[in-house]
Image (cartoon, rainbow, N blue to C red):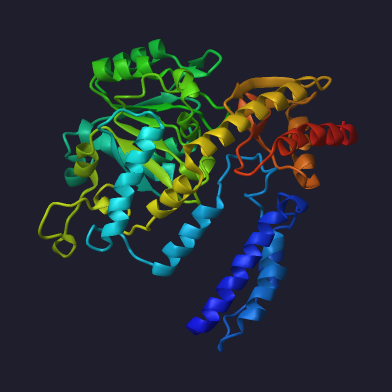
């Protein structure tokens, strides 16, 4: 392909993309293919000669698109959203075109400096205290792993990377039972181990970690000769939106000199609305590490996860490695590859710059407020269905319910809803029972899309009960 042909196909794909988004409501949300169907249509061996782009695009339409679940569909209420606002998509086109590897300041000064400014824009937008710096990670999983590694190194006097963990005893990390599975995985990868991730009981309407039980677990571990390393709190847990009381947890952490990480991957975006901060953000200042995902609820193209750091030095002391070929001479600069596990880095900050400038905080706030309001309306409508139970009340834009019947019936309803195609929901577990989750947050959804959940649940329930 030459550059003239590239230009023509670029226009074609841009037009295709606009039409795709404008017609999403006409498509079933979830792919309806069976395992192996897509692979069976692809050639079994690579072509020896190049093919015309028109043939490739035709096969894309015929083979690939029927197997795609449409995450940008306004009736996608499963998992959490992974949004892609148009300005963010355009920024990604530019990033893909320039194709820079932004690992060091000198390998792309603009990428580094825009990232620093975007981190501070978001710090201000979320109401975090001055002094927080940060870095853009690919996902909250990477940010959490970075924080857990930092906990490990800090607890071992920064000797773990050099000496290994043999002979250093049991390092303990504390969290609630409502944390995302990425916290478990981070403890696996960091060498801390599943058995040393201590999950604390939750209680109250926000399903918050019990501070009394937390402190008792720390005291018990100290008495047993173990080494407490850190605490992971959550604001807006994946399952049902569990949100810890941040102030008391931070006070305990300071009392025992423990490193703290706050997982606000989904709900952190809502903190651009000041009215939500009293309930979910009080006590946040002082946490050593905080992560939230602009690619979930704020409209940034996946992947884009922001990790704020109260003091970057411990994470740098954990992750920084500087062979001669990566050294930067001259004035002191920031090299963000030293703040993260991967060396290679994309120019993720550009989409944040485009997104925030295109909409402004007021527009982004309005979308989130609408989602929260519509979620409560939907919850009340589901509550009114005969025999239905609201299991967890809305926490921001997430709630869960059960239909009449046992756990098998919950799964049967979820499967029937998703096979129907009008909406997409997921199941979960809470307090030993299967639940049906509703997570509102697709960037362009409207009230009618959210209320379609009620209509669809009602219709499908009539056919299966």
Pinpoint residue 463: horizontal percent, then vertical percent. 89, 36
Q: Which residue extends farthest bottom?
A: 49
Q: Which residue extends farthest left?
A: 330
Choose top left, top right, bottom left or bottom right for residue 427. top right
Q: Which residue extends farthest right?
A: 463
* 438 or 1: nearer the viewer: 1
Q: Is 376 positioned to the left or the right of 290 in the image?
A: right
Q: Is 168 positioned to the left or the right of 349 in the image?
A: left
* 296 or 330: nearer the viewer: 330
Residue at image position (38%, 30%) is 262
> Which image quarter holds the C terminus?
top right
Classify 412 as above or below 19: above
Choose top left, top right, bottom left or bottom right for residue 231. top left
Residue at image position (56%, 47%) is 83
Choose top left, top right, bottom left or bottom right for residue 431. top right
Pinpoint residue 287: horizontal percent, then vertical percent. 31, 27
Pinpoint residue 142: horizontal percent, then vertical percent. 38, 45
Pinpoint residue 57: horizontal percent, then vertical percent. 65, 74
Residue 406 seen in render:
yes
Q: Is 74 positioned to the left or the right of 239 in the image?
A: right
Residue 243 seen in render:
no
The tally of labels here is: 0
Residue at image position (67%, 48%) is 73
């Amino acid at each position: 392909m030459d550059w003239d042909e590239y230009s023509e196909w670029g226009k074609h794909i841009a037009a295709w993309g606009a039409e795709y988004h404008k017609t999403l409501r006409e498509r079933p949300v979830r792919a309806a293919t069976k395992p192996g169907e897509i692979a069976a249509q692809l050639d079994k061996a690579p072509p020896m000669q190049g093919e015309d782009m028109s043939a490739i695009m035709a096969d894309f339409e015929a083979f690939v698109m029927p197997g795609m679940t449409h995450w940008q569909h306004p009736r996608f209420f499963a998992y959490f959203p992974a949004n892609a606002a148009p300005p963010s998509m355009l920024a990604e086109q530019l990033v893909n075109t320039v194709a820079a590897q932004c690992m060091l300041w000198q390998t792309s000064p603009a990428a580094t400096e825009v990232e620093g400014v975007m981190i501070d824009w978001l710090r201000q937008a979320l109401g975090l205290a001055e002094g927080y710096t940060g870095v853009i990670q690919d996902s909250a999983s990477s940010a959490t792993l970075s924080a857990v590694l930092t906990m490990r190194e800090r607890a071992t006097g920064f000797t773990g990377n050099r000496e290994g963990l043999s002979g250093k005893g049991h390092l303990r990390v504390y969290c609630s039972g409502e944390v995302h599975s990425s916290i478990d995985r981070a403890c696996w990868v960091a060498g801390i181990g599943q058995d040393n991730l201590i999950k604390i009981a939750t209680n109250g309407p926000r399903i918050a970690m019990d501070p009394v039980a937390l402190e008792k677990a720390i005291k018990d571990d100290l008495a047993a000769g173990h080494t407490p390393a850190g605490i992971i709190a959550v604001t807006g847990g994946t399952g049902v939106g569990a949100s810890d009381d941040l102030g008391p947890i931070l006070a305990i952490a300071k009392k025992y000199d423990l490193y703290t990480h706050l997982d606000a991957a989904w709900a952190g975006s809502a903190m651009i609305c000041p009215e939500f901060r009293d309930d979910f953000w009080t006590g946040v200042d002082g946490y050593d590490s905080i992560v939230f995902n602009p690619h979930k609820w704020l409209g940034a193209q996946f992947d884009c996860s922001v990790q704020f750091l109260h003091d970057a030095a411990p994470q740098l002391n954990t992750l920084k490695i500087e062979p001669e070929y990566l050294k930067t001479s001259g004035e002191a600069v920031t090299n963000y590859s030293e703040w993260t596990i991967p060396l290679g880095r994309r120019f993720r900050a550009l989409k944040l710059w485009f997104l925030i400038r295109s909409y402004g905080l007021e527009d982004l706030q309005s979308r989130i407020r609408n989602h929260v309001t519509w979620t409560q309306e939907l919850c009340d409508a589901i509550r009114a269905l005969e025999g239905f139970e609201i299991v967890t009340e809305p926490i921001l834009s997430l709630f869960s319910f059960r239909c009449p019947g046992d756990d098998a019936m919950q799964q049967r309803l979820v499967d029937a809803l998703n096979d129907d195609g009008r909406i997409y929901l997921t199941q979960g577990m809470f307090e030993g029972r299967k639940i049906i989750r509703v997570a509102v947050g697709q960037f362009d959804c409207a009230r009618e899309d959210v209320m379609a959940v009620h209509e669809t649940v009602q219709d499908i329930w009539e056919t299966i009960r």
